[in-house]
Image (cartoon, rainbow, N blue to C red):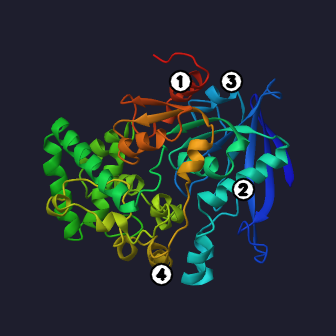
Amino acid sequence: MTVTTRRLQDLRIDDHTLIVPLVWGDDTDTRTIDVHAAVVTPDGGEALPYLLFLQGGPGFEAPHAFHAPTSPSWLDAAIAHYRVVLLDQRGTGASTPFGDADLDRGDEGVAEYVTHLRADAIVEDAEAIRESLGVSTWSVLGQSFGGFTILRYLSVHASSLDEVYITGGLSAAGRRPDEVYALTYDKMRDASEAYYRRFPGHRDAMRERLDLAASGGIVLPDGEVVSTSRLRSLGMLLGTNDGWQTLHSLLETDPRTNASRYDLAAALPFSARNPLYYLFHESSYADGFATRWAADRVEPQDFRDDETLLTGEHARRDWLDTVPGLTPWKGAALRLAETEWPRLYDAAALEASGARGAAAVYVNDVYVPVEFSLETAKLLPGVTPWVTSEHEHNGLRSGDVLTRLIDLAQGRRVR
């Protein structure tokens, strides 16, 4: 392990880099990768316990350590109680990042490599970091996919965890991807209709843009001819606290202008900046199943009939032919969709884990349905759910969410 230290205002940041196996548990495979974690310690906090942060995604690096209101806004709440470990999940940030250079592996090689970057491997990386820090246990905070990863952690290494905090990340355990995506379409139907009720003229504005896209009339700065399915994916904005404002601005701006084209490019999800997010997003719901483009397969008929119904975190197969940044990954993506993924969660182990902590469950979450979250919460009676409509899926970005969860975990009443 190598460690370097830097300072940022009143924070000491120790950058830890470990060399770990690419394939945990297979001594015959000698491939290795680097895994990086930044340990953030406030002045005078050298004796504080550790809190591991697991980022949402999958396929996104940990945030940089800045005080609010820069990013992340929850960090100040965390460092009042913990030294925070910001782990770059394998394939992201400084942890042997995955990107365009990996195309040299070929389609089959890329697909095989990506199978080793999922939550089960991330947990083993986290264990290696914990052991390198010389602590027997630590607490953990997981946002969205990070919460999914905590469920894996509790399934295989529960004894390593003290308090667990989960925000928008109580995944469906044992459910098929089809079941999850079918329910997320229901959530997006409700979110779409609620938006149009609030801004009635915007349904026609969206319809005009869909007609323009269908005729090839919306071209992004990178040359992408925006398809109707890509345009509809702007519905992802409705899953965040303030994303509706971005959607509103886009629908109030002439789509032919430079400003609109650049703003649309920035707002569309599943960009080529983090190809992993697109390549194995559906695998995060594959608890023992192949995905086979689940979001495409279970799209309801009313969504097919009415394109003004916006879609959410649904990775569409046709983007492999229409999105310039994704087309090079087509062969690998098609292979990954047929991969029979191993089980991630063990319901019996979760029930026996003795996990303690708290979880924010968002009633209106369009990404992680509340119904399945509450189902999973029953497996963790020591993790108190805070069920709220006060925030959308990205509520952790509000500084008070983590504070409320810490209060709940420590037995203090939450208003």
Task: Indicate which disc, 3 or 1, sits on the residue closer to the N terminus.
Answer: 3
**SS class of the residue under badge 4?**
helix
Instruction: Give, as a three-letter code, the residue at label 4.
Output: Gly
Q: Nearer the N terminus, badge 1 or badge 4? A: 4
Residue 359: assigned label: none
Question: The C terminus appears in which quarter of the rendering?
Answer: top left
- The residue tagged 3 is 80
Q: Residue at x 38, y 55 (%)?
A: 313
Q: Are marks 2 and 1 in contact (CB under 8 Å)?
A: no
Could you tell me the amino acid type at mark 3?
A: Ala
Where does the image place residue 353, in percent across and percent down from the top left? Answer: 63, 42
Between the residue at mark 2 and the residue at mark 1, the CA separation in whole angstroms equals: 29 Å
Which residue corresponds to mark 1? 404
- Mark 3 and mark 2 lie on one chain; the one further toward the N terminus is 3
Mark 1–mark 4 Cα distance, whole angstroms, equals 45 Å
- Reading the chain from its start, which is encountered first: label 2 or label 1? 2
On residue 331, which mark appears?
4
Amino acid type at image mark 2: Asp
**Alpha carbon separation for disc pair 3 and 1:** 13 Å
Report whether 199 appears left or right of 397.
Answer: left
Task: Say whether disc 4 or disc 2 marks the residue closer to the N-terminus.
Answer: 2
Say which residue label 2 marks: 125
Is 234 left or right of 154, judged from the image as shown? left
